[in-house]
Image (spheres, rainbow, N blue to C red):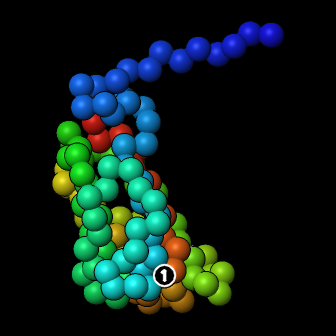
Amino acid sequence: MSNLVFNKQTRLDGREIGQCTAWVHFDATTNPPTIKGSLNVLGITDNGVGDYTINFALNMDNENYSVNVTGNTNAGNQVVRESVFRSVTGIQIHTVNNGALADLSKVSVSILGGID
């Protein structure tokens, strides 16, 4: 049996190239949103119903990162929404339920890339 060996590259700031550079799981029904777990997230700004800015603890090197946003309600309605605006300091997202902006109980955002 052979083992796969990965050649990981680590930057001086400790982030590994090719790994998730930021992620957060939060409850948006509270004000401010309650972060349940995160990596490289300084905080979340509530811009209004279903509108949030996720601020990075360590800036990205560029805005060429991949974003995945998922969420659902306590009733189990699954919602997927894309990013609205991205920068090296954070990303703005919208969450939707039944076609309208909504505060969801379970929102997960993952960021891949953005570091050189």
Q: Quadrant of the C terminus?
A: top left
Q: Is residue 67 above or below residue 75?
A: above
| Left or right for 91, reference 22 | left
Q: Residues within 10 Å of mark 1 (few under 14, many from 20)?
A: many
Q: Residue visible at 24% across and 31% down?
A: 13
Type of residue at label 1?
Leu
Q: Quadrant of the N terminus?
A: top right
Q: Secondary structure at mark 1?
A: loop
Foreground residue, 102 or 16?
16
Q: Residue visible at 40% across and 68% down?
A: 35
Q: Is any atom of residue 110 visible in this view?
A: yes
The quadrant in which residue 109 appears is bottom left
Task: Residue 83: give x, y in percent of width and height.
Answer: 35, 65
Task: Residue 60: give x, y in percent of width and height.
Answer: 23, 44
Q: Is residue 36 above or below residue 112?
A: below
Foreground residue, 41 or 85?
41
Count of residue discs: 1
Q: Residue visible at 20% across and 46% down?
A: 59
| Left or right for 115, reference 16 | left
Task: Residue 99: give x, y in percent of width and height.
Answer: 49, 87
The quadrant in which residue 26 appears is bottom left
Residue that lies at the very extreme toward the right in this rendered image:
1
Task: Residue 73: give x, y in percent of width and height.
Answer: 57, 82
Q: Is residue 100 above or below residue 71?
A: below
Q: Is residue 102 above or below residue 39?
A: below
Q: Is any atom of residue 96 visible in this view?
A: no
- Determine which residue is flagged by label 1: 104
